[in-house]
Amino acid sequence: MSAGSVVGAEPLGIIAGGGDLPLRVAEAAAAAGRPVHVVVLEGQGDPGAFSAFPHVVLRFGLAATMLRWLREAGARQIVLAGRVTRPSILSLRPDGAGMSLLSRIGRAAFRGDDSILSAVIRVLREDGFEVLGAQHVLEDLLPPPGLLAGEAPGEAAHADIARGVAVCRALGAVDVGQACVVQQGLVLAVEAIEGTDAMLARSAALRRDGPPGVLVKCVKPGQSRLADLPTIGPATVRGAAAAGLAGLAFEANGTIVMDRAGTLAAARAAGLFVLAFDAETVLKETET
Amino acid sequence: MSAGSVVGAEPLGIIAGGGDLPLRVAEAAAAAGRPVHVVVLEGQGDPGAFSAFPHVVLRFGLAATMLRWLREAGARQIVLAGRVTRPSILSLRPDGAGMSLLSRIGRAAFRGDDSILSAVIRVLREDGFEVLGAQHVLEDLLPPPGLLAGEAPGEAAHADIARGVAVCRALGAVDVGQACVVQQGLVLAVEAIEGTDAMLARSAALRRDGPPGVLVKCVKPGQSRLADLPTIGPATVRGAAAAGLAGLAFEANGTIVMDRAGTLAAARAAGLFVLAFDAETVLKETET
């Protein structure tokens, strides 16, 4: 689906976490002629960024209020966009309706991030909303397989990518992180909730001499492609360069590249490769 | 096997990495009447600690020299003990014999830590050595299941332990780390090569309000119990306390507790529980 298919006068609801993505979705939808209504998640998204749009700031616990507000605005389609830190149990403080929603999300709220998102998406659908991915509003958000910048990774980097994919898959299967750093076959760092930038920062101190390592990012097996996709951007490239890596490799058709021109320019300037890979192909090559 | 079975006049070889364990093994073997010969791995172990024993300091690349020296000393039994950072490919600089050994270790040297160790142990056995675990020389090194300090973990901590075991198992299956920190079902941090102390240090900044988290350490599935077992000690307890955790849970009969009295005293002083669990039991409870 491209932006074309969502052009029109139908209002679009956005539930906005952190980062640039929610605003870019809002601007693209508005440019396509759609009224945009934004719920900014308290403590996650930046309300100031959405001053041009009708918006409310609400905490997670008031999820039922969010949905009522979006429904009253006529938004039947909703995009969940931006970085979200799962709230602590104490900070939820749900109201009555929020508690009822929470009970429908259920035990998933106490498992991994992806379980929660899947449960949230299910609840939204049960309530009559259609959930879109940011990629359905923004064209070219998820690059297909291919080398986007730099020289194609050599044998050592290729082996590190394959090991990284296997590690990400194992981690993803238990719904933990989406990224790791591999050098010379050794897993220097694995991402949990600290995020990729923090993981790259500590990798700098863990690197060893010799062939440089690679940042690998993957979608979790079975992950909904409607929210919380792995993301890279210019800051990721700067972090990878500072960690002495050879390049960034990420799962094609499932990783968001923010500010693609800026990201690739930064990679070229730092001499890093940027590769979008097909995970099944990488894993198949490794088996042989 | 207890220390009793290795009492005697037969020389014992120790290949020593970092930390206190190699010296404790050496002292226990010497106290049992055995001549002890120590190869200190250059850049890993502390040669000064072994001044009371015949010892040499050699880098990894001179593995063949290590084995010749141990054989000439009459040591047929070898213990691999202590923390070892896998050397970079560049720092290996093997001599001719070392290169031949390396080729027998083969591709495993470019995979995870446990693959390497298994390959090293296989090569040692092929060369006529018997490889013992530190636990075969030091009694009571690996606690059996049971609560060692503090109050038994409540429901929240128990759920975090179960999630931690599942995550450690997934990580271990791809031969990465042996530990993670879980709070309220959320995986705050996962261990790669940075080690448990560094992982605990960053967990402090990632913790959330509400029920505190747990450090979970497990043996990797299929891991040899002869070397590189997960280890905790007083520093682990201090790190867990600083990270605001409720306690430490580790796999019974497979985790080394260094300075057990000091470790448990530190835990009691900080109000942390220390639990040795049977992994299969924990995983079975989770399924139901």
Image (cartoon, coloured by chain):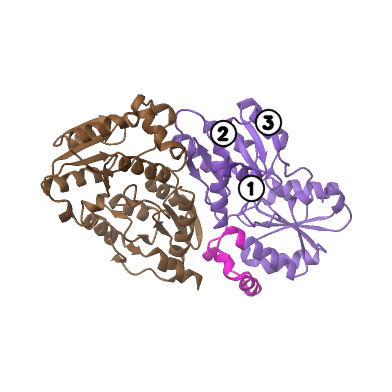
Chain colours: A purple, B brown
Q: Residues within 10 Å of mark 1 (few under 14, many from 20)?
A: many
Residues at discs 1 and 3 both on one chain: yes
* Disc 3, SS: strand
The answer for which chain carries disc 1 is: A
- Is B101 situated above or below A179? above
- In the picture of the structure, the residue carrying the numbered disc 2 is A157
Q: Nearer the viewer, residue A272 or A47?
A: A272
- In the picture of the structure, the residue carrying the numbered disc 1 is A230
Q: Which mark is residue A149?
A: 3
- Is A184 situated above or below B226? above
Nearer the observer: mark 3 or 2; the answer is 2
Rendering quarter of residue B17: top left
Q: How far, Cα to Cα, is label 3 from label 2?
A: 15 Å
A280 horizontally vs B9: left or right: right
* Disc 1, SS: loop
A196 horizontally vs B249: left or right: right
Residue at the extreme right: A8
**Residue A125 seen anywhere in this rendered image of the structure:** yes
Tell me the magenta residue range.
A87-115
Quadrant in the picture for the N terminus of chain B: bottom left
Residues at discs 3 and 2 both on one chain: yes
- Tell me the residue at 74%/51% (across/down): A134
Q: How far, Cα to Cα, is label 2 from label 1?
A: 20 Å
Circle 3: residue type: Ala
Rendering quarter of residue B276: bottom left
Circle 1: residue type: Pro
* Disc 2, SS: helix
